[in-house]
Image (tube, grey):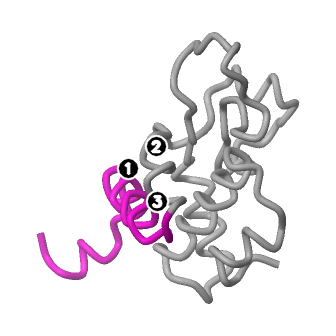
């Protein structure tokens, strides 16, 4: 494969997963350890059932999703039905990244991941901004 060919291939699911993992590792403690217990799934687009439940017609509108019970709402009485999951959707992330044109792909993935972690942790806007500098 030539360099020109490699430069025209869109980042794949594995690269988005790697960037998400790097974003978790870069989180400050105590968030880093807690974030490693959240399952991160990378897909090209949100599944049809998720889009339907959220009443979203255009799959490019959803870059990420948190599925679970926020830590601020969990109780020892809750019966776990599975791990909390953060979904990252590659194609919408790439679309937004290209539209922005002023951030790296790693920054874009981090931004989406941090936004979804905010739902998990129950962060305020100020807490999100402390972790994600371009949150506004």
Residue for badge 3: 32
* Rendering coords of residue 91 (x, y %): 55, 53
Which of the numbered marks, if any, corresponds to residue 106? none
Marks 2/1 in contact by CB < 8 Å: the verdict is yes
Decide: is 82 above or below 113: above
Q: Nearer the viewer, residue 117 or 72?
A: 72
Tag 1's secondary structure?
helix
Q: Nearer the viewer, residue 2 or 94?
A: 94
Decide: is 45 above or below 135: above
- N-terminal of the pair, mark 2 or mark 1, is 1
| 25 within the magenta span | yes
**Residue segment shown in magenta:** 1-29
Residue 27 appearing in the image: yes
Quadrant including the C terminus: bottom right
Residue that lies at the very extreme toward the left in this rendered image: 1
- Which residue is at 69% across, 15% downward? 78
Residue for badge 1: 13
* Rendering coords of residue 132 (x, y %): 64, 75
* Real-space Cα separation, disc 3 to disc 1, in angstroms: 22 Å
Quadrant including the N terminus: bottom left
Which of the numbered marks, if any, corresponds to residue 42? 2
- Which residue is at 42% across, 48% downward? 36
Tag 2's secondary structure?
strand
Q: Quadrant of residue 65?
A: top right
Decide: is 103 above or below 17: below
Query: Nearer the viewer's eye, disc 3 or disc 1?
Result: 3
Q: Quadrant of residue 10?
A: bottom left
Q: Residues within 10 Å of mark 3 (few under 14, many from 20)?
A: some
């Amino acid at each position: 494969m030539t360099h020109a060919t490699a430069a025209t291939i869109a980042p794949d699911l594995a690269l988005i997963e790697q960037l998400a993992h790097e974003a978790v590792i870069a989180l400050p403690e105590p968030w880093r350890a807690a974030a490693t217990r959240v399952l991160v799934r990378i897909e090209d687009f949100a599944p049809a059932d998720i889009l339907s439940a959220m009443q979203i017609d255009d799959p490019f509108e959803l870059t990420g999703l948190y599925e679970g019970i926020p830590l601020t709402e969990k109780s020892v009485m809750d019966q776990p039905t599975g791990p909390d999951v953060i979904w990252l959707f590659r194609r919408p992330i790439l679309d937004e990244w290209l539209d922005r044109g002023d951030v790296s792909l790693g920054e874009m993935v981090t931004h989406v991941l941090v936004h979804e972690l905010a739902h998990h942790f129950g962060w305020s806007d100020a807490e999100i901004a402390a972790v994600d500098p371009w949150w506004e």
